[in-house]
Image: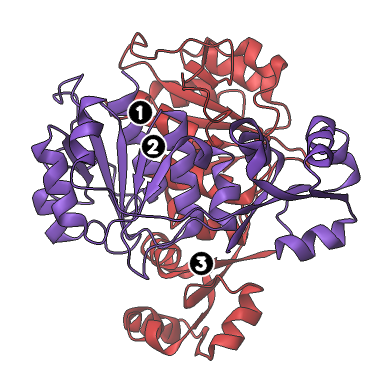
Chain colours: A red, B purple
Amino acid sequence: MKTINLCGLAAVSARWRQNPDSIERLFFDYDTGRKVGDMTKAMARMRKVYRCVENEELEKVAGSIHHGGIIAVVNAPELVGPTRSDPRAWAAARAPIVILDRIGNAHNLGAIVRTAAFYGVKHIIIPDTPEAARPNDAAYRVAEGGFESVQVWLPYNMVPLVEDLAAAGYEVVAASTRDGHGRTDDIKPGRPIAIVLGNEERGVSDELARVCTRRVTLPGTGNVESLNVSVAGAILMDRLLAR
Amino acid sequence: MKTINLCGLAAVSARWRQNPDSIERLFFDYDTGRKVGDMTKAMARMRKVYRCVENEELEKVAGSIHHGGIIAVVNAPELVGPTRSDPRAWAAARAPIVILDRIGNAHNLGAIVRTAAFYGVKHIIIPDTPEAARPNDAAYRVAEGGFESVQVWLPYNMVPLVEDLAAAGYEVVAASTRDGHGRTDDIKPGRPIAIVLGNEERGVSDELARVCTRRVTLPGTGNVESLNVSVAGAILMDRLLAR
């Protein structure tokens, strides 16, 4: 089975609180070891490997210098697509959704998931194409535990899913670098919200933008061409979900 | 003189538009070379070095794989502190300001500057301490040209500067991870705005927060501990500067 390295105390602690049994192995340095006594005790009870190691070994396990002093090895979740009835159920629960139309950079994916978790987003939708970054070690690290409170879905095709969300009552708001509305304050509070963010270079595809219920362009000064996609996503989440 | 490598077409083009004479040397790969014919012609006129090189040489010049296909070598700006009269002049011009209280990560600095440029921020204040990231190659690259439209200041001491800004009429808003107001919509439009963002681990220092005119805590679900500092900054800029 494929595994993921959860790196850093925020990501490891979040998994620990949600689902301690899912941690297969735990590695940490001396300093971090003093903060995770409860975890190591439980790992011992579960007869699983935990080890206090030198920095070099953490780097080797993580395959990166960005291990944050602790690594939990967990099984990678199997990602599946939603069923046809899920959009109606999500709409009934008014569950906020973030749809990522081929975000290519795993750091951006992780940054978006961190903010999404902060604002109570329940579902993250990623298309099943090789261009789209999947949740990997870097994304989990940058998300600082955010993956533990969202469900990631991998639909085969995005357009019919967005059509189903719109039909179920979602306001599906695409972040567009041009041609969109500048304002969002006329979107009715209480309506379920889906936010669509596009590829770092090419934005949301025309095909997908067409089936969204609204396109929003955040107005800027033109001093830089655009906002980073994780920043644009955060601003839309703040505007639409924090009210 | 210390130099900076501006990497990537966004950062290089922004500098080119603002101040072409400041580019000392220009290196690019074959693909990018086809997009910068006007630059190379002007470099030739100015009798400056420009070179189409292999990827490996770009990596060597940049000291990183993140060169984005083009590198402009420029002289690093000398950073100085504002004078005692600057806060009053800035307030008269209603110039938005972002104050960074020991942001340690150059990527976060660059991300904040990109968003700040998008929202028309004029002045970025960084304390003169070794903990605080200075504008470097990575910060310039992440800022995507944002440094060209802001002025970076390096005051000796932040507390009297913030006191002077408040006395000059600024609403000085500190992003606080706890104990702040949740709302920002009661801040009067038209008042000059300064946003204070704190260190990634420790936030805004108590000493500095005390002299700000307001502390804001963005309310979240608790699913993750906090927002990334560049995301929190972007949300405050959107709330306070985009109206």
Q: Are marks 2 and 1 in contact (CB under 8 Å)?
A: yes
Please provide percent x and percent y for residue A202: 70, 28
Q: Are marks 2 and 1 on the same chain?
A: yes
Q: Residues within 10 Å of mark 1 (few under 14, many from 20)?
A: many
Q: Residues within 10 Å of mark 3 (few under 14, many from 20)?
A: few
Callout 2, which amino acid? Ala
Q: Residue at x 42, y 36 (%)?
A: B116
Q: Residue at x 18, y 31 (%)?
A: B183
Judging by the rendered image, the residue that carries numbered circle 2 is B234
Task: Tell me if residue A126 can be seen.
Answer: no
Please provide percent x and percent y for residue B78: 46, 56
* Of B211 and A104, the residue lying toward us: B211
Task: Tell me if residue A14 can be seen.
Answer: yes
The circle on residue A22 is: 3
Please tell me whether residue B139 is drawn above or below residue A166 in the rendered image. below
Secondary element at tag 3: helix
In this view, the mark in front (3 or 2): 2
For marks 1 and 3, give the CA distance.
Answer: 39 Å
Callout 3, which amino acid? Ser
Q: Residue at x 42, y 27 (%)?
A: A236
Judging by the rendered image, the residue that carries numbered circle 1 is B238
Q: Chain of mark 1?
A: B
Question: Total marks drawn?
Answer: 3
Please tell me whether residue A97 is drawn above or below residue B102 in the rendered image. above
* Of B8 and A89, the residue lying toward us: B8
Please provide percent x and percent y for residue A229: 55, 35
Callout 1, which amino acid? Asp
The circle on residue A117 is: none
